[in-house]
Protein backbone atom coordinates (compact mmCIF):
# COMPACT_ATOMS: atom_id res chain seq x y z
CA UNK A 1 0.00 0.00 0.00
CA UNK A 2 2.78 2.44 0.92
CA UNK A 3 4.50 1.97 -2.44
CA UNK A 4 1.37 2.87 -4.37
CA UNK A 5 1.23 6.40 -2.96
CA UNK A 6 4.88 6.96 -2.14
CA UNK A 7 6.13 10.19 -3.73
CA UNK A 8 2.71 11.06 -5.13
CA UNK A 9 1.14 14.48 -4.73
CA UNK A 10 -2.32 14.45 -3.19
CA UNK A 11 -4.71 17.41 -3.15
CA UNK A 12 -7.30 17.24 -0.37
CA UNK A 13 -9.97 19.93 -0.24
CA UNK A 14 -11.33 20.75 3.20
CA UNK A 15 -8.14 19.61 4.91
CA UNK A 16 -9.05 21.89 7.80
CA UNK A 17 -12.03 19.70 8.64
CA UNK A 18 -12.34 16.49 10.61
CA UNK A 19 -12.46 14.00 7.75
CA UNK A 20 -10.16 15.96 5.42
CA UNK A 21 -7.52 16.26 8.14
CA UNK A 22 -7.58 12.53 8.84
CA UNK A 23 -7.38 11.69 5.14
CA UNK A 24 -4.46 14.11 4.68
CA UNK A 25 -2.54 12.48 7.52
CA UNK A 26 -3.15 8.96 6.26
CA UNK A 27 -1.99 9.93 2.78
CA UNK A 28 1.19 11.39 4.24
CA UNK A 29 1.74 8.27 6.34
CA UNK A 30 1.53 6.31 3.07
CA UNK A 31 4.30 8.47 1.59
CA UNK A 32 2.41 11.18 -0.29
CA UNK A 33 3.04 14.91 -0.24
CA UNK A 34 -0.20 16.70 0.53
CA UNK A 35 -1.82 19.96 -0.49
CA UNK A 36 -4.62 20.84 1.91
CA UNK A 37 -7.21 23.53 1.40
CA UNK A 38 -9.25 25.46 3.93
CA UNK A 39 -11.96 28.07 3.64
CA UNK A 40 -12.55 29.77 7.01
CA UNK A 41 -10.26 27.83 9.37
CA UNK A 42 -6.56 28.10 8.54
CA UNK A 43 -5.24 26.99 11.95
CA UNK A 44 -6.45 23.37 11.85
CA UNK A 45 -5.10 23.00 8.32
CA UNK A 46 -1.71 24.33 9.45
CA UNK A 47 -1.80 21.91 12.38
CA UNK A 48 -2.31 18.97 10.03
CA UNK A 49 0.44 20.31 7.75
CA UNK A 50 2.85 20.41 10.69
CA UNK A 51 2.05 16.76 11.47
CA UNK A 52 2.60 15.84 7.81
CA UNK A 53 6.03 17.52 7.83
CA UNK A 54 6.87 15.67 11.03
CA UNK A 55 6.20 12.45 9.09
CA UNK A 56 8.82 13.55 6.56
CA UNK A 57 6.44 14.53 3.76
CA UNK A 58 5.87 17.92 2.18
CA UNK A 59 2.70 19.86 2.92
CA UNK A 60 1.19 23.00 1.42
CA UNK A 61 -1.80 24.84 2.88
CA UNK A 62 -3.96 26.86 0.47
CA UNK A 63 -6.97 29.09 1.02
CA UNK A 64 -9.83 28.19 -1.30
CA UNK A 65 -13.41 29.35 -1.04
CA UNK A 66 -14.99 26.82 -3.34
CA UNK A 67 -18.18 28.83 -3.67
CA UNK A 68 -16.13 30.83 -6.16
CA UNK A 69 -15.94 29.21 -9.60
CA UNK A 70 -12.33 30.27 -10.20
CA UNK A 71 -11.06 28.81 -6.92
CA UNK A 72 -10.95 25.20 -8.15
CA UNK A 73 -8.58 25.75 -11.08
CA UNK A 74 -6.52 28.27 -9.10
CA UNK A 75 -6.02 25.67 -6.36
CA UNK A 76 -4.89 23.03 -8.83
CA UNK A 77 -2.50 25.53 -10.45
CA UNK A 78 -1.01 26.43 -7.06
CA UNK A 79 -0.58 22.76 -6.14
CA UNK A 80 1.18 22.10 -9.46
CA UNK A 81 3.40 25.15 -9.03
CA UNK A 82 4.63 23.77 -5.70
CA UNK A 83 4.76 20.00 -6.27
CA UNK A 84 4.80 19.69 -10.07
CA UNK A 85 1.67 17.64 -10.54
CA UNK A 86 -1.46 16.34 -8.86
CA UNK A 87 -1.67 12.53 -8.77
CA UNK A 88 -4.50 12.17 -6.28
CA UNK A 89 -7.55 14.40 -5.84
CA UNK A 90 -9.75 13.94 -2.79
CA UNK A 91 -12.72 16.29 -3.22
CA UNK A 92 -13.75 16.34 0.41
CA UNK A 93 -14.82 19.91 1.23
CA UNK A 94 -18.53 20.16 1.84
CA UNK A 95 -21.27 22.25 3.37
CA UNK A 96 -24.58 21.14 4.81
CA UNK A 97 -26.87 23.60 6.55
CA UNK A 98 -29.70 21.60 8.09
CA UNK A 99 -33.11 22.93 7.05
CA UNK A 100 -36.50 21.55 6.12
CA UNK A 101 -37.23 21.46 2.42
CA UNK A 102 -39.66 24.38 2.79
CA UNK A 103 -36.85 26.58 4.15
CA UNK A 104 -34.26 26.00 1.44
CA UNK A 105 -34.01 29.17 -0.62
CA UNK A 106 -32.23 29.72 -3.91
CA UNK A 107 -29.02 31.15 -2.39
CA UNK A 108 -28.48 28.17 -0.12
CA UNK A 109 -29.30 25.72 -2.91
CA UNK A 110 -26.77 27.40 -5.22
CA UNK A 111 -24.05 27.65 -2.54
CA UNK A 112 -24.43 23.99 -1.61
CA UNK A 113 -24.27 22.91 -5.23
CA UNK A 114 -21.24 25.13 -5.85
CA UNK A 115 -19.16 23.70 -3.00
CA UNK A 116 -20.38 20.09 -2.93
CA UNK A 117 -20.83 19.36 -6.64
CA UNK A 118 -19.53 22.07 -8.97
CA UNK A 119 -16.13 22.43 -7.28
CA UNK A 120 -15.41 18.66 -7.40
CA UNK A 121 -16.28 18.75 -11.10
CA UNK A 122 -14.12 21.81 -11.82
CA UNK A 123 -11.17 20.34 -9.93
CA UNK A 124 -11.56 16.99 -11.65
CA UNK A 125 -11.65 18.72 -15.02
CA UNK A 126 -8.45 20.56 -14.11
CA UNK A 127 -6.48 17.45 -13.07
CA UNK A 128 -7.77 14.77 -15.46
CA UNK A 129 -5.81 15.67 -18.63
CA UNK A 130 -2.42 15.36 -16.90
CA UNK A 131 -3.49 12.18 -15.10
CA UNK A 132 -4.53 10.62 -18.40
CA UNK A 133 -1.29 11.62 -20.11
CA UNK A 134 0.79 10.17 -17.25
CA UNK A 135 -1.48 7.11 -17.14
CA UNK A 136 -1.95 7.37 -13.39
CA UNK A 137 -4.57 9.17 -11.36
CA UNK A 138 -6.86 8.76 -8.38
CA UNK A 139 -10.01 10.80 -7.92
CA UNK A 140 -12.23 10.35 -4.91
CA UNK A 141 -15.43 12.20 -4.02
CA UNK A 142 -16.85 12.57 -0.50
CA UNK A 143 -20.55 11.85 -0.71
CA UNK A 144 -22.95 10.87 2.06
CA UNK A 145 -25.56 8.27 2.82
CA UNK A 146 -27.94 11.19 2.27
CA UNK A 147 -27.38 10.68 -1.46
CA UNK A 148 -28.94 7.23 -1.11
CA UNK A 149 -31.65 7.66 1.52
CA UNK A 150 -32.29 11.42 1.47
CA UNK A 151 -30.74 11.94 4.90
CA UNK A 152 -31.73 14.59 7.43
CA UNK A 153 -29.81 17.71 6.38
CA UNK A 154 -32.04 18.73 3.51
CA UNK A 155 -32.88 18.40 -0.18
CA UNK A 156 -30.02 20.68 -1.25
CA UNK A 157 -27.44 18.50 0.53
CA UNK A 158 -28.87 15.15 -0.60
CA UNK A 159 -29.12 16.33 -4.21
CA UNK A 160 -25.59 17.76 -4.23
CA UNK A 161 -24.15 14.49 -2.97
CA UNK A 162 -26.23 12.34 -5.33
CA UNK A 163 -24.90 14.48 -8.18
CA UNK A 164 -21.39 13.29 -7.36
CA UNK A 165 -22.48 9.73 -8.06
CA UNK A 166 -23.62 10.63 -11.57
CA UNK A 167 -20.46 12.64 -12.18
CA UNK A 168 -18.35 9.66 -11.09
CA UNK A 169 -20.29 7.19 -13.25
CA UNK A 170 -19.93 9.39 -16.32
CA UNK A 171 -16.20 9.92 -15.92
CA UNK A 172 -14.96 6.63 -14.49
CA UNK A 173 -15.69 4.51 -17.53
CA UNK A 174 -14.08 7.07 -19.84
CA UNK A 175 -10.75 7.28 -18.00
CA UNK A 176 -10.37 3.75 -16.60
CA UNK A 177 -8.25 2.60 -19.54
CA UNK A 178 -5.78 5.41 -18.87
CA UNK A 179 -4.98 4.24 -15.36
CA UNK A 180 -7.26 6.74 -13.63
CA UNK A 181 -9.77 5.54 -11.06
CA UNK A 182 -12.79 7.59 -9.97
CA UNK A 183 -14.61 6.50 -6.83
CA UNK A 184 -16.92 7.85 -4.15
CA UNK A 185 -17.18 7.19 -0.44
CA UNK A 186 -20.53 7.76 1.23
CA UNK A 187 -20.18 7.92 5.02
CA UNK A 188 -22.76 8.61 7.70
CA UNK A 189 -22.66 9.92 11.26
CA UNK A 190 -18.95 10.56 11.63
CA UNK A 191 -18.13 12.12 15.01
CA UNK A 192 -15.62 14.88 15.68
CA UNK A 193 -16.34 16.92 12.57
CA UNK A 194 -18.16 20.15 11.80
CA UNK A 195 -21.23 18.20 10.74
CA UNK A 196 -23.75 17.68 13.53
CA UNK A 197 -23.87 14.08 14.66
CA UNK A 198 -26.35 12.39 16.97
CA UNK A 199 -25.51 11.99 20.65
CA UNK A 200 -23.60 8.70 21.03
CA UNK A 201 -25.20 8.19 24.48
CA UNK A 202 -28.72 8.46 23.09
CA UNK A 203 -30.46 5.11 23.65
CA UNK A 204 -32.05 5.57 20.21
CA UNK A 205 -28.60 5.34 18.59
CA UNK A 206 -29.42 4.80 14.90
CA UNK A 207 -26.17 3.06 13.96
CA UNK A 208 -26.43 -0.75 14.06
CA UNK A 209 -22.81 -1.20 15.18
CA UNK A 210 -23.68 0.90 18.24
CA UNK A 211 -21.26 3.78 17.85
CA UNK A 212 -20.63 6.76 15.63
CA UNK A 213 -17.95 6.52 13.00
CA UNK A 214 -14.63 8.34 13.28
CA UNK A 215 -12.67 10.38 10.78
CA UNK A 216 -9.99 7.69 11.04
CA UNK A 217 -12.57 5.07 9.96
CA UNK A 218 -13.18 7.16 6.84
CA UNK A 219 -9.48 7.78 6.21
CA UNK A 220 -8.72 4.04 6.41
CA UNK A 221 -11.37 3.26 3.79
CA UNK A 222 -10.22 6.12 1.58
CA UNK A 223 -6.66 4.80 1.67
CA UNK A 224 -7.86 1.33 0.70
CA UNK A 225 -9.84 2.79 -2.20
CA UNK A 226 -6.96 4.94 -3.45
CA UNK A 227 -4.50 2.06 -3.41
CA UNK A 228 -6.64 -0.42 -5.34
CA UNK A 229 -6.20 0.04 -9.07
CA UNK A 230 -9.01 -2.44 -9.85
CA UNK A 231 -11.60 -0.39 -7.96
CA UNK A 232 -13.31 2.27 -10.03
CA UNK A 233 -16.82 3.64 -10.68
CA UNK A 234 -17.92 2.63 -7.18
CA UNK A 235 -19.82 4.23 -4.32
CA UNK A 236 -18.58 2.64 -1.10
CA UNK A 237 -20.87 3.24 1.87
CA UNK A 238 -19.35 3.53 5.35
CA UNK A 239 -22.12 3.89 7.87
CA UNK A 240 -21.97 1.24 10.60
CA UNK A 241 -24.70 -0.70 8.83
CA UNK A 242 -27.36 2.00 8.48
CA UNK A 243 -28.02 1.62 4.78
CA UNK A 244 -28.50 -1.97 3.61
CA UNK A 245 -26.87 -2.03 0.19
N1 LIG B 1 -19.30 14.13 9.33
C1 LIG B 1 -20.21 13.34 8.79
O1 LIG B 1 -20.97 12.67 9.50
C2 LIG B 1 -20.30 13.22 7.29
C3 LIG B 1 -21.17 12.27 6.76
C4 LIG B 1 -21.27 12.14 5.39
C5 LIG B 1 -20.51 12.93 4.56
N2 LIG B 1 -19.68 13.85 5.09
C6 LIG B 1 -18.90 14.68 4.16
O2 LIG B 1 -17.54 14.67 4.54
C7 LIG B 1 -16.91 15.84 4.03
C8 LIG B 1 -16.02 16.43 5.10
O3 LIG B 1 -16.85 16.94 6.15
P1 LIG B 1 -16.49 16.80 7.70
O4 LIG B 1 -17.44 15.84 8.27
O5 LIG B 1 -15.03 16.61 7.88
O6 LIG B 1 -16.97 18.25 8.23
P2 LIG B 1 -16.11 19.53 8.61
O7 LIG B 1 -15.21 19.19 9.74
O8 LIG B 1 -17.12 20.62 8.80
O9 LIG B 1 -15.26 19.84 7.31
C9 LIG B 1 -15.81 20.51 6.20
C10 LIG B 1 -14.68 21.03 5.36
O10 LIG B 1 -15.21 21.68 4.20
C11 LIG B 1 -14.61 22.97 4.09
N3 LIG B 1 -15.49 23.94 3.48
C12 LIG B 1 -16.70 24.38 3.93
N4 LIG B 1 -17.15 25.36 3.14
C13 LIG B 1 -16.23 25.55 2.18
C14 LIG B 1 -16.11 26.44 1.08
N5 LIG B 1 -17.04 27.36 0.80
N6 LIG B 1 -15.01 26.35 0.30
C15 LIG B 1 -14.06 25.45 0.57
N7 LIG B 1 -14.09 24.58 1.59
C16 LIG B 1 -15.17 24.65 2.40
C17 LIG B 1 -14.30 23.38 5.52
O11 LIG B 1 -13.29 24.39 5.53
P3 LIG B 1 -13.20 25.50 6.72
O12 LIG B 1 -13.54 24.78 8.00
O13 LIG B 1 -11.79 25.96 6.66
O14 LIG B 1 -14.17 26.57 6.40
C18 LIG B 1 -13.82 22.06 6.11
O15 LIG B 1 -12.48 21.84 5.83
C19 LIG B 1 -18.03 16.76 3.54
O16 LIG B 1 -18.11 16.71 2.13
C20 LIG B 1 -19.28 16.15 4.15
O17 LIG B 1 -20.43 16.40 3.38
C21 LIG B 1 -19.55 14.02 6.44
Image (tube, grey):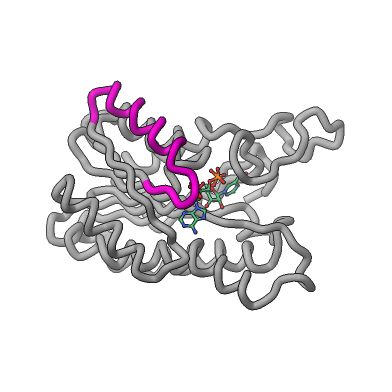
Relative to 86, is 163 above or below?
A: below
Residue 27: x %, y % from top left = 33, 35
Residue 166: x %, y % from top left = 48, 68
Residue 106: x %, y % from top left = 64, 78
Q: What's the magenta region?
A: 37-57
Dominant SS in magenta = helix
Relative to 56, is 245 above or below?
A: below
Q: Nearer the viewer, residue 60 or 183?
A: 60
Residue under the point 33% across and 48% down: 62
Relative to 171, is 32 above or below?
A: above
Residue 42 among magenta residues: yes
- Furthest residue in direction bottom, as rendered: 106
Residue under the point 63% across and 42% down: 239
Residue 85 among magenta residues: no
Q: Examine the image and state in which quarter residue 34 appears.
A: top left
Q: Nearer the viewer, residue 147 or 43?
A: 43
- Furthest residue in direction top, as rendered: 54
Judge left or right: residue 240 versus residue 134. right
Amino acid sequence: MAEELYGRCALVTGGSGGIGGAISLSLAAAGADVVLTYSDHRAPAEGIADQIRALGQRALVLAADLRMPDAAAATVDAARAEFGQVDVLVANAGVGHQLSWEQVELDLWDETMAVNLRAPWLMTRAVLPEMISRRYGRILFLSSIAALNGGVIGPHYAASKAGLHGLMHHLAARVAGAGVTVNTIAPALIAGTGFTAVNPDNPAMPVPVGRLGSADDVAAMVLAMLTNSYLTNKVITLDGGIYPD
